[in-house]
Image (cartoon, rainbow, N blue to C red):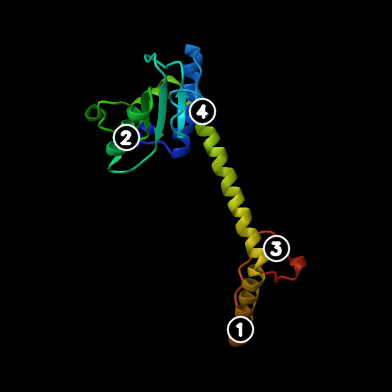
Amino acid sequence: MKEQNGKLSRDEFISFVKAVLKKKSLEENKPLYFEYRVSGNSKLAESARRFDAFAPDGFFRYQEPVIFEFIDSKSKQLEKRIQTIADDYRKNYEAETIFIVNARTSAEELDLTVWDINEINKWIKEYPAEYGHVCSWNIDRKRTTQDKEKFQISENLYRDDLYQKNNDIYTNAIRTCIEEKKGVAIVLGAGVFEGTGSKNLG
């Protein structure tokens, strides 16, 4: 469990938070939109800013519209960044802002609604199925990425004819050893038989 290192990977963080928020919104039967860009005649539409998530009819104990901001940061000025965003939103939008942060914060000093890694760790226990799904998806995605990287490396080697160049180097080195030395020992693994011409040392 990620409680041990105190932080989820960025992909796990974003995916897990979205899964939990979506489930909570369904439980409350209230709409929730991700990657939401305000438009139309709404009072919130004074800016083209896009929110990580937006609950127009409220969320949890909040009755007014709620803006969600997901922050995955190692910045030493994390609290300052949160405060700057909060001040901007208070000035421009008639909505409550909830910050969900993939780190530990001094939330009590901000006088803001901040759900940090401590809250996320509670969610991991409360929503184990969603967390397990996110972790499995992340592992599969990493494997796919690694397979693609391996294929690309192999493709580049063949394209640049590096295998042939390396084989030529090794072959020439062995030929030199045979020509300059009186004896050469070759160790062969399993699967080599007398029928191939190898000497029977038995």
Sequence-wise, the earlier of marks 4 and 3 is 4
- Foreground: 180 or 36? 36
Q: Nearer the viewer, mark 4 or mark 2?
A: 4
- Foreground: 141 or 32? 32
Q: Please identify the quarter of the rendering in which residue 1 is found.
A: top left
Q: CA–CA distance between discs 3 and 2? A: 67 Å
Amino acid tagged 4: Ser
Q: CA–CA distance between discs 4 and 3? A: 73 Å
Sequence-wise, the earlier of marks 3 and 2 is 2
Q: Position of residue 10 (x, y in %)?
A: 44, 39
Q: Which residue is mark 4?
A: 39
Question: Which residue occupies the extreme front position in the image?
Answer: 41
Q: Which residue is mark 3?
A: 192
Residue at image point 63% right, 66% down: 188
Determine contact: label 1, label 4, CB under 8 Å: no
Q: Which residue is mark 2?
A: 82
Question: Which residue occupies the extreme left position in the image?
Answer: 109
Q: Within 10 angstroms of label 4, few (less than 14), some, or many (20 or more) residues?
A: few
